[in-house]
Image: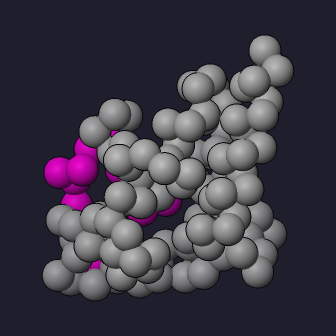
Amino acid sequence: MSDIASTGGRLSYLNITNRLLCVELFREIRKAQEDSAARGENWGAYIIQPGETLSPDLVAYKVYGIDTLKWVIMVAAYLDDPRERLPAGTTLYLPKTSYLRERIRYYESLGARE
């Protein structure tokens, strides 16, 4: 998944060195797409617009103010390749940056115990 990586920083999934733990974070994001109980106050909804279907980085910029969080958009949309289309009209449930930061720290700490 290196082609959807952010450039680094605290909100990069690359901070989770154990790839299996990284997958758990991705599962949390994907579960929230299907299960409203998996979401809470730390989640918001975003509807993909027709002009955004080939631009997960544009969606990330609109939602988070930073385009490097396109990996969150791609995980939520079940995309593996940044060249795949985001279906227009699709509602994505996206975590707030505070939630991402907390969960990345959590999984980092689990990986450090190994």
Quadrant where the N terminus lies?
Answer: top left
Q: Residue at x 34, y 34 (%)?
A: 2
Q: Residue at x 78, y 34 (%)?
A: 109
Q: Position of residue 66 (x, y in %)?
A: 37, 69
Quadrant where the C terminus lies?
Answer: top right
Can you say whether 68 is above or below 12 in the image? below
Residue 86 in view (yes/no): no
Given residues 65 and 52, the one toward you in this image is 65
Can you say whether 30 is above or below 14 in the image? below
Given residues 87 and 18, the one toward you in this image is 18
Q: Is 8 on the left-hand or right-hand side of 53?
A: right
Q: Position of residue 59 (x, y in %)?
A: 33, 74
Which portion, as a residue range, is magenta? 73-88
Q: Residue at x 32, y 66 (%)?
A: 67
The furthest residue to the front: 9
Q: Is 85 on the left-hand or right-hand side of 37?
A: left
